[in-house]
Image (cartoon, grey):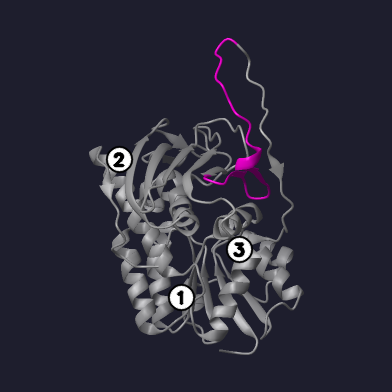
Amino acid sequence: MHAPLSIAVLGTGRMAEVHLAALARLRERNALQPPLRIGLYGRNTARVEELNHQHAVDFVMPDLEDALTRSDVDVVDNCLINALHYKPLMKAIRNGKHVLSEKPLAMTLAEARELYDTAASAGVVHGIIQNMRFEPGIAAAKKLVETGEVGRVFHIRTVFGYFVPPGVDNRPLWFYQADKAGGGIVHDMMAHFFDLYEWLIGPVVGVTCRASTAYGERYDASRSEKAGDVEDVAGCLVEFASGALGDAFMSWVRRKHEEVPYFELDGENASLRFSFHRIEIERAGETSAFRFDPTEEQHDKQSWQTLDIPHRNAFEVQFERFFEGLARGVPAEPHWGHGLRAMELLEAAYRSAATGNRIDSSNEAWAP
């Protein structure tokens, strides 16, 4: 590696901006040794200039080939659309670059497996962005499960939903185009939730999924480009090896009711409800007895306690872990093995949605 260490961020969209902001803060704090140099590739020159101004990018690369092959780049960080994960990442690996990628790792399980095998054979350090693991509320939930305070886990529930109108104005249109995204809301969000479920609770052994498309046609502001060939509503039932159950409901046609995403976890000793920046606990000894009376309004007599938790930017935490792994020459978690496993579970979910069957999802692709 070079001194300073150089990372090339690919893309100028929303997630690339989040990555740039986190990397710039690490650079400003001198949090990394050797010091960090940040490069940016993008086709939209005006957007590149805007991000350069905001985050003081050290060098700009107008050509993708240059970003993947230049000798002074140590790490390639892929924030391009899903359809542009496989080829650029493969080229980066073959040019000896260490690699980071936004989730999902690839469009298909076959692509993900080839990427993982190639990176492992090449000996490069690889990482998959799973910021949810490092969000303060979720990290606190993980600690409560690990320390035994929750006890035996019975169930986890996830709700993710907000409204995206047919005239898409609050996220990129490509999310609704199968040839660019690989799938719809299952592909987009279960890539996060499957990873979280196995990280929090343990191996998933069964997946049942149902999905539908509420808006079969979506379009951009000018109506010049159309989309809508992917699912925008879905539910997944997950079975764990431990006997616990999980369910995730996801929708791009649901009005927002709670923090996005929102989680509930029930265990023998305590229950949790949490989001990215907040967590509450109700312990077994403080749980009020409940008797259902349909003639009376129910009042919340439960004893939920809000916990104080440290707050840090999840992307900064993950970048720090990645660079620590780079210094040791060993991929830090979550790495492409976890990305491959998420893709295996995504494929199981889509097979279930297509066939109407429960799909056995024993860990075949990679053992964490």
Q: Residue at x 47, y 79 (%)?
A: 125
Q: Is residue 16 above or below residue 234?
A: below
- The span shown in magenta is 267-295
Verify CB contact (< 8 Å) between mark 2 and mark 3.
no
Q: Count the marks.
A: 3
Circle 3 Cα neighbour tier, 10 Å, few/some/many (<14 / 14–19 / ≥20): few
- Say above or below: 319 vs 5: above
When the figure is inspected, residue 330 is found, relative to residue 193, above or below; the finding is below
Mark 1 vs mark 3: give the one in front: 1
> Would you name the residue on which mark 1 appears?
65
Compared to residue 213, the image places residue 76 above or below, namely below
341 sits to left or right of 43: left
Between 209 and 290, the one lying in front of the other is 290
Which amino acid, by three-letter code, is at mark 1? Glu
Q: Is residue 272 magenta?
A: yes
* Rendering quarter of residue 61: bottom right
- Label 2: how many residues lie within 10 Å, few (<14), some (14-19) or many (20+)? many
Quarter of the image where one finds residue 58: bottom right
Q: Farthest right residue?
A: 29
Callout in the foreground (1, 2) = 2
> Quick one: 75 or 135, which is closer to the camera?
135
Position of the N terminus, as image quadrant, is: bottom right
Q: Residue furthest top?
A: 295
- Residue 353, numbered circle: 2
Q: Position of residue 336 (x, y in %)?
A: 42, 69
